[in-house]
Image (spheres, rainbow, N blue to C red):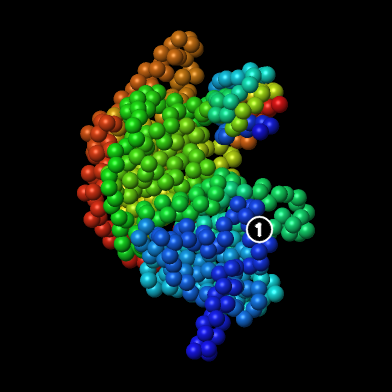
Amino acid sequence: MTEKTTYNERLEDKLTTIFAGGHPKYHEKMKEQNKLFVRDRLALLFDDGKYLEDGRFANCEAADLPADGVVTAMGKVNGQSVCVMANDSTVKAGSWGSRTVEKIIRIQEIAEKNRVPMLYLVDSAGARITDQLDMFPNRRGAGKIFHNQVRLSGFIPQICLLFGPSAAGGAYIPAFCDIVIMVEGNASMYLGSPRMAEKVIGEKVSLEEMGGARMHCSVSGCGDVLVTSEEEAISEARRYLAYFPANFTEKPKLVEPKLPKEGRTLEAIIPENQNAPFDMYEAIDQLIDEGSFFDVKKLFAPEIITGLARIEGQAVGIIANQPKAKGGVLFVDSADKATKFINLCDAFSIPLLFLADVPGFMIGTKVERAGIIRHGAKLIMAMSSATVPKISVIVRKAYGAGLYAMAGPAFEPDVCIALPTAQIAVMGPEAAVNAVYSNKIEAIEDPKERIKYVQEKHQEYKEEIDIYKLASEMIIDEIVKPSDLRSVLAERFHAYSTKELPQPPRKHPVYPV
Amino acid sequence: MKQLESTMAGTVFTVNVKEGEEVTAGQTIMVLESMKMEIPVEAEVAGKVATIKAQIGDFVNEGDVLVTFE
């Protein structure tokens, strides 16, 4: 009896130490930064706050390394099992020792075997330099974490919630995730710290400027969703997961349909003048179930909108040009943004909706030198090789390679729908008339005659690209009234839900980068 | 915000503010014409316009300063 009590007490003592995490002074510091303790984060993330933990006793013989600085667990989110690794930054700043790394590798293996999503709750200073031989270069060292991430990519959803730093090699955890949610003010990603940058290359820069959450979500594109608190990060992760199946073999779940948000009609939103801007978000609201939009990379390359949504309860991925930002023209960053999003949706059987209002890819020295052609090729390849149901809607103009990038007829969309305002052409009327008739126009000396001639040619050109002519040639499949678009999309996505597309035998394409 | 930069290469189509004018966040400061499109350039935060650096018809590259604020 006494012996048993002693055994139990010893276990209780150990558990108390483990659950307490690091020294109280580090808990205090976290509170000052509006950060939550790792176990509180997990309690918020999982349904009913419940989870199964593994490797709890890792490094329990060491006095100050409870759980070796990481909690690995399996629990439920929206009723769906998921695996999680979560750094404890009260323990040696969340740094990785050999057991930390082994725990992360093991939870990834559990996620793979059970085919469930893997979440990474990152708040870590990086490698424990003192332990480097045990955790850095070996077969089951930190490199294996990234190797596993690559192996799992597209097999199960992988999500990163960044609460603190993700430094040096550790920064590759977010890089290999499908999506990265960053808490403004606390989250950061960098290969070399500002201190290292000053020592090694002589640059003086703040952490926020070089690797802060806002910078990554708006400039580098390494972050996808910028949030203001850890609670918001966790609720956004839960909301995101609801659009995804557990793994690539399953399909997204249907939910109860909702009516779209009340607002102006599409006819009222879309201006007649092809060149005038409007807010595509307002148009999207009229097509989707109210409150169902999950914006991915909202602050990055805003000239293209990418987001998850529901149309009558069905999950869809929307890629839409935003005429309000940079005229909806496609740039290097917009191509990157849409490429990753299309790959994400295609991997997990989320059908794609393209809403085209695009003057084309940007031209000029700056973008040519930045390789706009190879970036555009990435987007076109991703869109072209996606095998999920694809619907392309020509909202207004679709000029040049912009038509191609937005799943134009040649790229086998399941249907190409035009609104009556649609205009499809190699280029717009103004540019085309200038290109073809510039010598003739310049030769006309009388200014009135010249204007008259140009106007005639504009008119001829507009008739040439009239949307009913394109429909008559069966270039587009359907012309739909804006007020009917939502129900047409819902019916068509439903109709294509059994789509299967056999692929030509090969290992994989040679991806443009 | 000390200055407002052009979001893309294009020609200044309209200048919608005057020097000394107080502007609010999201207010259209200029409209550029590029790729045959009208591109509004909006103030990121509220402020008072100090100098206007580009006039109607000027070509501006991405990143060029359009307006400075006090």
Residue A153 location, quadrant? bottom left
Q: Is residue A273 visible?
A: yes
Residue A29 lies, with reference to residue A412, above or below; the image says: below
Residue sitting at x 70%, y 23%: B50
Residue sitting at x 29%, y 38%: A259
- Residue A504 percent location from the top left of the image: 32, 62
Q: Where does label 1 land, which residue?
A: A28
| Callout 1: chain | A
* Total numbered labels: 1
Residue A106 lies, with reference to residue A278, above or below; the image says: below
SS of the residue under disc 1: helix
- Give A285 or A42, whichever is nearer the viewer: A42
Residue A419 location, quadrant? top left
Residue A97 lies, with reference to residue B21, above or below; the image says: below
Residue A88 lies, with reference to residue B42, above or below; the image says: below
- Residue B7 percent location from the top left of the image: 57, 34
Left or right of A351 on screen, residue A201:
right
Q: Is residue A217 visible?
A: no
- Residue A321 percent location from the top left of the image: 43, 38
Residue sitting at x 32%, y 41%: A289
- Give A470 or A175, whichever is nearer the viewer: A175
The amino acid marked with disc number 1 is Glu
